[in-house]
Amino acid sequence: MWTYNTVLVVAGSGALGALCALVGTFAFLRRQVLLGDTVAHATLPGVCLAFLLLGHRHPGWISLGALATGMLGAATVAALVRWTRVRSDAALGLVLSVFYGLGVVLSRIVQNQTTTGSKAGLERLLLGSAAAMVAWDLALVLAVAAVAAAVFGIFWHFWKLWAFDSQY
């Protein structure tokens, strides 16, 4: 029996899976599969810093904090590869471990130094729960998937060239 919640979860997971397949193919071809994992782990310090600055869990500001440190992590990987002798896979592992370690330290500070930190539920923001998906989450996933698919469609020839011959 298809319930409302089941339809939301299946539609959201399907759209997210299709988007990840599209992006993941190019990440695989560029040998940067770990980049998604690195950026995901780099969001933890941003989540904790946003919570420490605000003192509560506001989804917009928490997301901006996560976006900021995630992009900083990706930029750090690019800078390490470009301006040092560190190889791409080593840079990804280095940034992943450093940012995640910083996030764990900040998470501990959130839990210990704030009165609401132990009840903040920041781990639920990071790990999520597909079964708790609501219509707003589905709309967000579908919108992001549509924009990403449009960008890939518009710049398809560029993406192919970038994946197979980046020097050109």
Image (spheres, rainbow, N blue to C red):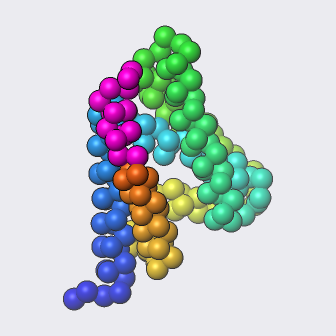
Camera-nearest residue between 54 and 165 = 165
Is 165 within the magenta? yes
Give the magenta range. 155-168
Q: Quadrant of residue 42?
A: top right
Q: Residue at x 52, y 19 (%)?
A: 82
Residue 35 in which image quadrant: top left
Q: Nearer the viewer, residue 110 or 142?
A: 142
- Label count reads 0
Q: Quadrant of the C terminus?
A: top left
Q: Position of residue 20 (x, y in %)?
A: 34, 52
Q: Residue at x 50, y 41 (%)?
A: 39
Q: Is residue 118 magenta?
A: no
Residue 61's spot in the image, x, y percent?
69, 59
Tell me if 22 is positioned left or right of 155 in this view: left
Q: Is residue 127 visible?
A: yes
Residue at image coords 74%, 52%: 52
